[in-house]
Image (cartoon, rainbow, N blue to C red):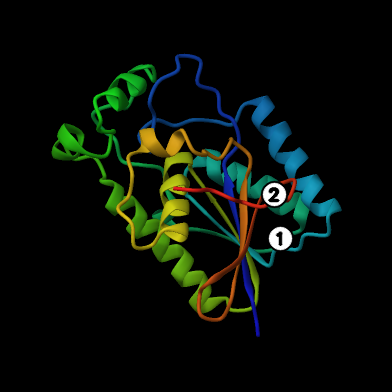
């Protein structure tokens, strides 16, 4: 039986001195620390013998830069940008202080529901739909291969819930962040069988089992 392996990476740490919401709306660059950590993770994976056939990435600069670093160190010859992997659409919060996030979550909603969804923000279901479509594409078009994905924190976190809990209602981001949230420059690895069932899941880069309970 041919198994397909997907490496899910969050982009590296960025320069955000004003600590504001940005989503897909504000241009953000990787910080020096971010570049160094992505390179460190890539070297560790290389030393473990990891071989990735190709990479899909969000088209945003911070993700593309991360993908290019990974590709250089892991010798990945093909990198393709996909709009579906982009960061979240949160226009009414872009540029506002990130500290507001905790206040929003205390109300029992998040920036993807309630008045924010009414204001045109992506909903949790919208994000899951576009992100999961990329996984389905990989399982359909790259069977038996190893593929990388570079995307963004909230987008990846909602996707992880979908992968592990397909038939459950998607929790708010406030709830998900208390369970697990991928650090910048890190992520997880999943191996799928021919039917799309997850056979193995591990955190990157150290290989600990990904064991999340909801």
Q: Which quadrant, please, contains the N terminus?
A: bottom right
Instruction: Indicate the position of residue 49 as horizontal and vertical percent values.
Output: 83, 59
Q: Residue 78's x, y, as percent?
A: 64, 64
Say which residue appears at 30% left-offset and 53% top-offset: 169
Q: Residue furthest right?
A: 47
The crowd level at tag 1 (other Cα within 10 Å; few <14, some 14-19, many 20+) is: some
Mark 2, other Cα within 10 Å: few <14 / some 14–19 / many ≥20: many
Name which quarter of the figure residue 22 lies in.
top left
Residue 92: x and y in percent read: 23, 29
Q: Is residue 205 left or right of residue 67?
A: right
Q: Position of residue 141 (x, y in %)?
A: 52, 77
- Quadrant in the picture for residue 99: top left
Give the secondary structure at mark 2.
helix
Question: Is residue 43 rendered to the left or right of residue 104?
Answer: right
Q: CA distance from mark 2 to mark 1?
A: 8 Å
**Left of 78 or right of it: where is 139?**
left
- Residue 127, compared with residue 136, is above or below; it is above
Q: Residue at x 36, y 42 (%)?
A: 88
Q: What is the count of numbered marks?
A: 2
In this figure, which residue is indicated by the disc labeled 2?
70
Picture residue at 35% right of the left edge, 23% below the top: 101
- Work out whether 192 lies above or below 188: below
Disc 2, disc 1: CB below 8 Å? Answer: yes
Reading the chain from its start, which is encountered first: label 2 or label 1? 2
Residue 172 drawn above or below residue 29: below
Residue that protrudes farthest toward the top in the picture? 18
> Which image quadrant for residue 108?
top left
> What residue sits right under mark 1 in the picture?
76
- Helix, strand or loop at mark 1: loop
Q: Residue at x 49, y 78 (%)?
A: 140
Indicate which disc residue 84 carries: none
Furthest-bottom residue in this view = 1
């Amino acid at each position: 039986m041919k198994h397909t392996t997907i490496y899910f990476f969050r982009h590296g740490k960025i320069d955000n001195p004003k600590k504001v919401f940005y989503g897909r709306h504000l241009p953000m660059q990787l910080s020096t620390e971010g570049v160094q950590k992505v390179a460190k993770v890539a070297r560790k994976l290389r030393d473990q013998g990891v071989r990735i056939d190709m990479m899909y990435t969000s088209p945003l600069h911070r993700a593309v830069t991360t993908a290019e670093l990974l590709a250089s160190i892991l010798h990945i010859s093909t990198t393709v940008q996909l709009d579906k992997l982009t960061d979240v659409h949160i226009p009414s919060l872009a540029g506002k202080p990130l500290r507001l996030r905790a206040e929003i979550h205390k109300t029992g909603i998040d920036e993807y529901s309630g008045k924010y969804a009414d204001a045109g923000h992506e909903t949790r279901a919208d994000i899951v739909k576009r992100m999961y479509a990329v996984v389905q594409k990989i399982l359909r078009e790259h069977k038996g291969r190893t593929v990388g994905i570079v995307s963004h924190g909230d987008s990846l976190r909602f996707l992880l819930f979908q992968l592990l809990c397909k038939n459950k209602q998607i929790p708010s981001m406030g709830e998900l962040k208390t369970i697990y949230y991928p650090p910048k420059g890190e992520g997880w690895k999943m191996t799928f069988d021919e039917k799309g069932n997850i056979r193995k899941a591990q955190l990157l880069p150290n290989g600990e089992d990904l064991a999340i309970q909801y």
